[in-house]
Image (cartoon, rainbow, N blue to C red):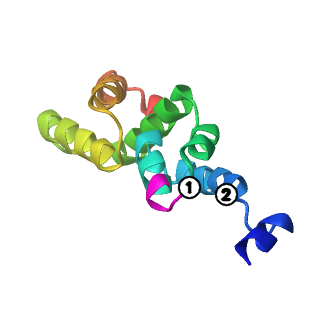
Amino acid sequence: MLDRFEEVGLIDDAEFAGLWVQGQQRRMTSARAMRRELHAKGVDAAIIAEAMPDAEADYAAALALARKKMRTMGALEPRVRDRRLAGALARRGFAPGLCHRVVTEVTGAASEGSDEDW
């Protein structure tokens, strides 16, 4: 029965993976976390590799999340703010090096006083 569903196009793992990744990108989730979740859903590794965004998209998602979080952390002490930003990024699955890079960029823009950068 599943073979028949695949023949008529009712089951398409590649389409599912692509649409699912797009939705997760809007939620600012890391590629590493998306890859892990798709694997847990039973999607084939080759299909997962095709659906994954590039490294630049992962950076953009991390930067967008950090900027969003930064808006609510303006009154915090810098050390606390940095720790909370890094924690938020890490919980979404971003790599430690990327977390550090993004937190440094976002907090550097905030310390320069340019609200439009963050």
Query: Magenta stretch containing residue 40, yes or no?
Result: yes
Q: Secondary structure at mark 2?
A: helix
Q: Distance from label 2 to label 1 (Cα)?
A: 7 Å
Q: Which residues are magenta?
A: 39-43
- Residue matched to label 2: 13
**Quadrant where the N terminus is found in the figure:** bottom right
Q: Pinpoint residue 29: horizontal percent, then vertical percent.
A: 45, 48
Kindly report the secondary structure that dominates the magenta region of the rendered protein. Answer: loop
Residue holding disc 1: 43
Residue 57: name its quadrant.
Answer: top right
Q: What is the three-letter code of the residue carrying label 1?
A: Val
| Disc 1 secondary structure class | loop
Three-letter amino acid code of the residue under disc 2:
Asp
Please report contact status of discs 2 and 1: CB closer than 8 Å, yes or no. yes
Name the foreground residue: 117 vs 89.
89
Q: Residue at x 80, y 72 (%)?
A: 4
